[in-house]
């Protein structure tokens, strides 16, 4: 979520864009890492199961000019490491078919 990226960027010397994480869906909520507590959400009329934290690989350390470094993975590892790996975001699976639109609200179902 955008608050999670803002929180991460507050810890980095050089901010990174959301695109570094190659997300399919980005939500705007007030609380960083709120998605860690979600089990099922709906975006518009499409329901999603939140299946597991998204562990991050070294691809996040390659910038837009194809230069590599240690960030943001090194900073994430200092506070977002768990038994799955260094995590940022969640993996979700759709439970029904539908169309997503940019203005669709996100509802936490459980």
Image (cartoon, helix red, strand yellow):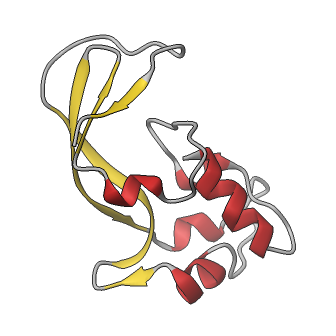
Q: Is residue 19 above or below residue 15?
A: above
Residue 28 relative to residue 35: left or right? right
**In the visual, does 108 lie left or right of 15?**
left
Image quarter for residue 65? bottom right
Residue 10 percent coordinates (x, y): 79, 67
Extreme residue in the right direction: 13
* Residue positioned most to the left: 95
Towards the viewer: 30 or 25: 30
Q: What residue do we see at 68% from left, 66% from top?
A: 8
Q: Which residue is drawn at 49% across and 44% down?
A: 23
Which corner quadrant holds the C terminus? Answer: top left
Q: Is residue 8 above or below residue 92?
A: below
Which residue is located at x 29 percent, y 78 percent? 84
Residue 9: % across, % down:
75, 64
Position of residue 31 in the picture relative to residue 93 (left or right): right
What residue is at 65 percent from the left and 56 percent from the top?
5
Q: Position of residue 44 (x, y in %)?
A: 35, 15
Q: Is residue 4 above or below residue 10?
A: above
Up the image or down, 82 lies above or below 64; here it is below
The quadrant in which residue 37 appears is bottom left
């Amino acid at each position: 979520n955008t608050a999670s990226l803002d929180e991460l960027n507050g810890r980095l010397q050089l901010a990174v864009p959301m695109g570094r994480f190659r997300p399919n869906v980005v939500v705007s909520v007030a609380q960083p890492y709120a998605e860690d507590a979600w089990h099922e959400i709906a975006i518009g009329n499409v329901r999603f199961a939140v299946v597991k934290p998204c562990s991050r690989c070294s691809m996040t350390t390659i910038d837009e000019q194809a230069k590599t470094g240690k960030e943001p993975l090194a900073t994430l590892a200092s506070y977002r490491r768990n038994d799955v790996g260094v995590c940022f975001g969640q993996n979700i699976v759709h439970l029904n078919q539908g169309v997503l639109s940019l203005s669709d609200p996100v509802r936490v179902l459980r």
